[in-house]
Amino acid sequence: GATIGILGGGQLGRMLSVAASRLGFECAIYEPGSAPPAGQVAARVVTAPYGDEDALRAFAATVDVITYEFENVPTAALDILEETCPIRPNRKALGISQDRLTEKEFLNGLGLQTAPFAAISTADDLTAAVKGIGVPSILKTRRFGYDGKGQVRLGSDADIGRAIEEMAGSDAVLEGFVNFSHEVSVIGARGLNGEIACFDPGENLHDDGILRTTTVPARLSGAQKADAVLLTGKILNALDYVGVLGVELFVTPGGLIVNEIAPRVHNSGHWTQNGCVIDQFEQHIRAITGWPLGDGARHANVKMENLIGADMDRVADLSADPGVALHLYGKAEAKPGRKMGHVNRITPKD
Ligand code: ATP
Ligand code: MG
Ligand code: MG
């Protein structure tokens, strides 16, 4: 069978590897860090930094297609890999979503709504932007932010100095605070032949910037659900995308506002593992290997809950709980804020 190269060895790479192996593929993981969770299930792990050109070339030579589990792979590494091997999703999708500014410009260019935003490099930029956008607002680093890291909330003009300090010279965007009723996301997939399939939107609850739970069905009208799926298809087509994409949305009386997109399988899509015949991980593997997309119709109501840090103390209880599917990532240390696993709680479909 073919071999799939995965950049990044975290839990998403691990669950992609499991799905791939079920379809008869082998996976090779490329990961700078030691003892990656995906390494426990993949056939092979290459431990090397993204700056190691020889290691990158050798990796690309041993796999048939390359994908990634996180969007911050340096583009220089992709240039080298791409000389030898196709990368799916493509470079464009990754490049745009590596930078919150280019991502928002891209989304607005498609006619989709985002929070009002402004590019910020200096304290003067921020002072001017706060005048235009107002408070409350959120200053976010353009690159490398995740789980709410690299963000400062501004409640008044008095916060400007502290916010600039916390950015520590990183380029940033200021976003107006969106007064949403709730948050939802769509996990969409596009195949090699351009076919598109979306999973049911999930409703997401965040705590301190980290996803806590995803619930399906989400509270959405039929029209809102259609909007969510159609805008996801628009994004997938515009990027000539192949693979699974996560689209995070704010629900407001004025319509759906796109918070951000993630060019990969997404934490808010973990419910599909126990709510659909084909989950997001298999869907991604199918897309990047040129298989037809699978049947992602939802057959249950699901509440996905992340197990973060000390939540691991509840595993023994959860393991005895009927209707609960446990997914653990094999990480050694349950540090605060660290995603250690998740559970999918299944009830009959509405
Ligand atoms: P992820 O782990 O999802 O990549 P992230 O670090 O990229 O997280 P965001 O998705 O930008 O962070 O923000 C995290 C959460 O903070 C959002 O899901 C939302 O709850 C809140 N938030 C972010 N931006 C805004 C905004 N402009 N208005 C209101 N709430 C916001
Ligand atoms: Mg993000
Ligand atoms: Mg987010």
Image: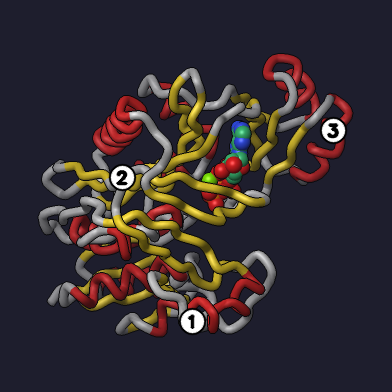
Q: In the image, what residue type sits under mark 1? A: Gly
Horizontal side, residue 259 vs residue 302: left or right: right
Q: How far apart are the two marked residues, 3 and 1, measured between alpha carbons?
A: 41 Å
Q: How far apart are the two marked residues, 3 and 2, measured between alpha carbons?
A: 39 Å
Tell me residue 56's x, y (percent). 38, 69
For label 1, the residue is 330
Return the residue nearer the eye: 230 or 75: 230
The answer, for residue 52, to whether it is visible in the render is no
Indicate how the structure is coloured in the image.
secondary structure
Q: Residue at x 79, y 45 (%)?
A: 166
Which label number is shown at residue 298?
none
The answer, for residue 307, to whether it is visible in the render is yes
Q: Is residue 165 above or below residue 315?
A: above
For label 3, the residue is 159
Horizontal side, residue 145 vs residue 235: left or right: right
Return the residue nearer the eye: 179 or 167: 179
Q: Is mark 1 within 8 Å of ligand 1?
A: no
Q: Residue at x 80, y 30 (%)?
A: 155
For label 2, the residue is 200
For numbered disc 3, what is the local secondary structure? Answer: helix
Label 2 Cα neighbours within 10 Å, binned few <14 / some 14-19 / many ≥20: many
